[in-house]
């Protein structure tokens, strides 16, 4: 039996689907057991019990592998990176109590305990917790994930479709190395089937300067949007105003700092196979047609 946290979400859904297609049994721990999903009764949904690791352990008793995709993108109300770290530590504790034999943990490229960015520092803290848990583990570190339900790439395309101009923060020469969500799922599931402790970057075969990525999207969509370089504060202000208009958080200051610090690339050999440029061309008719709201997706009860 496999436990996939967030199997009704984005990356968790692809991991769960791949496991089910291989004949595996899957249950999910989720923040919303009633969320719409494609699996129906095939995937039993149980609530997180971060406040009670013993009860959470009882709910996953008998599981062999835990695939953990739980995290938060930004602080909102009572959810924060610090709380996500505490919650994940409770999940690791529950896995140990339940006798889970392997954890596959979805992290991020270039985490660091010394980072000033809570996202990257929190991910590094959790990697240390997993290494010290005495449970067999695979830590999978993706960059930006693209796919049909992607938010970042989709919303860049959305802005290019809707606005006459697009502001590139700074010089735009910082790099990004997107990985396809199906490739991430394959990397995670294959890592789950191994026994040795692993740390793997999940990265695609193409990397781009951010400005070139935006221009590629515009060209592929056939848009003649004016693409300008501007100070990072102006990009943040524009994203905040757009966020207010769309009732969402489009981009945070820390996310922009991480991007501009070249934290979304890897020095390792590519582990994903899918070319972003090919996927973009194949999906040009649909990408960016509708805005993808982080808040609506993760915080609206359905």
Image (tube, grey):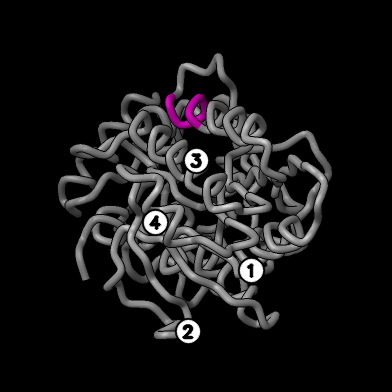
- Mark 1 falls on what kind of element? helix
> First in sequence: mark 3 or mark 2?
2
Lower sequence index among marks 1 and 3: 3
Q: Which mark is residue 93?
A: 3
Distance of mark 1 from mark 3, alpha carbons?
Answer: 39 Å
Say which residue appears at 45% left-offset and 82% top-offset.
Answer: 39
The residue identified by callout 2 is 42
Task: Judge by depth and name the residue closer to the eye, 148 or 45.
Answer: 45
What residue is rendered at 50% in x and 69% in y? 13
Which residue is tagged 4?
A: 155
- Earlier in the chain: of badge 1 and badge 2, it is 2
Query: N-terminal of the two: label 4 or label 2?
Result: 2
Q: Residues within 10 Å of mark 4 (few under 14, many from 20)?
A: some
Q: Secondary structure at mark 2?
A: helix
Quadrant the C terminus occupies? bottom left
* Residue found at x 75% / y 55%: 191
Give the residues in magenta. Answer: 118-122
- The spot of residue 198 in percent (x, y) is 77, 42
The local secondary structure at tag 4 comes to helix
């Amino acid at each position: 039996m496999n436990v996939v946290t967030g199997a009704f979400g984005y990356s968790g859904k692809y991991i769960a689907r791949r496991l089910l297609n291989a004949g595996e049994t899957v249950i999910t721990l989720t923040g919303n057991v009633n969320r719409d999903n494609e699996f129906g009764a095939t995937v039993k949904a149980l609530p997180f019990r971060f406040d009670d690791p013993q009860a959470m352990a009882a709910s996953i008793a008998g599981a062999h592998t835990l695939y953990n995709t739980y995290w938060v993108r930004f602080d909102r109300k009572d959810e924060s990176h610090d709380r996500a770290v505490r919650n994940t530590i409770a999940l690791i504790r529950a896995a140990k109590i339940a006798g889970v034999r392997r954890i596959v943990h979805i992290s991020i490229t270039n985490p660091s305990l010394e980072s000033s960015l809570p996202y990257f520092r929190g991910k590094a803290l959790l990697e240390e917790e997993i290494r010290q848990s005495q449970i067999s583990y695979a830590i999978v570190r993706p960059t930006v994930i693209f796919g049909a339900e992607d938010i970042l790439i989709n919303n860049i395309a959305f802005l290019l479709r809707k606005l006459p101009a697009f502001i590139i923060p700074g010089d735009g020469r910082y790099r990004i190395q997107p990985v396809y969500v199906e490739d991430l799922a394959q990397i995670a599931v294959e890592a789950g089937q191994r026994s040795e402790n692993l740390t793997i970057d999940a990265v695609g075969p193409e990397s781009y300067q951010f400005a070139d990525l935006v221009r590629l999207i515009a060209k592929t969509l056939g848009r003649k949007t004016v693409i300008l370089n501007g100070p990072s504060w102006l990009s943040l202000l524009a994203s905040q105003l757009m966020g207010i208009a769309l009732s969402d958080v489009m981009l945070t200051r820390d996310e922009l700092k991480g991007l501009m610090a070249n934290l979304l690339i890897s020095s390792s050999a590519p582990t994903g196979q899918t070319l972003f440029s090919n996927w973009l061309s194949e999906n040009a008719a649909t990408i960016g047609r509708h805005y993808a709201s982080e808040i609506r997706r993760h915080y609206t009860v359905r």
